[in-house]
Image (spheres, rainbow, N blue to C red):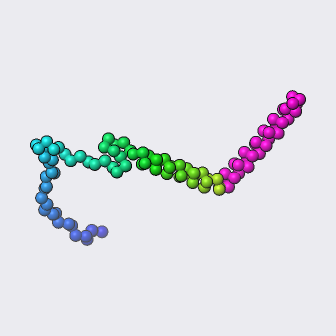
Amino acid sequence: MPDSSPTPEPMDAEIVPDPVPDTAAGAGPTPIPPAPDYDERGVPGFDYVRARIEGRFATSLGTTELAADTPESRSLDEQEAERDKAAKSKLDEIRRSLGR
């Protein structure tokens, strides 16, 4: 089936040269200002770093709380409690056999 959409006509455009910085005046290219939370050398500020750490900590706490509410987590907690109980029982048995 032939394509009935019209073929776009080529457009005329002029080529614009890239702006060249005025290095003849000794100014050089305009420096890019640092991000607001960074200093001139690119080192992040203390408040920025603290906010990132606190954000990651809050995310990890939330993830832990959500994971604790799953049935799989409760099952693992029950298994751990059973192992701890069995280990305590075995330790008590060993102590009794040693006469303590």
Q: Is residue 35 left or right of residue 66?
A: left
Residue placed farthest to the left in the image? 24
Judge by depth and name the residue closer to the eye, 74 or 5: 74
Q: Quadrant of residue 6?
A: bottom left
Residue 29, image x, y percentages: 19, 45
Main SS, magenta residues:
helix
The reply to whether the magenta stretch includes residue 72 is yes
Q: Residue at x 33, y 44 (%)?
A: 39
User: Looking at the figure, which quarter contains the C terminus?
Assistant: top right
Q: Residue at x 80, y 39 (%)?
A: 88
Residue 64, image x, y percentages: 60, 51
Q: Is residue 5 left or right of residue 97?
A: left
Instruction: Please provide the residue range marked out in magenta.
Output: 71-100
The reply to whether the magenta stretch includes residue 99 is yes
Q: How many marks?
A: 0
Residue 72, image x, y percentages: 67, 52
Q: Is residue 50 left or right of residue 91?
A: left
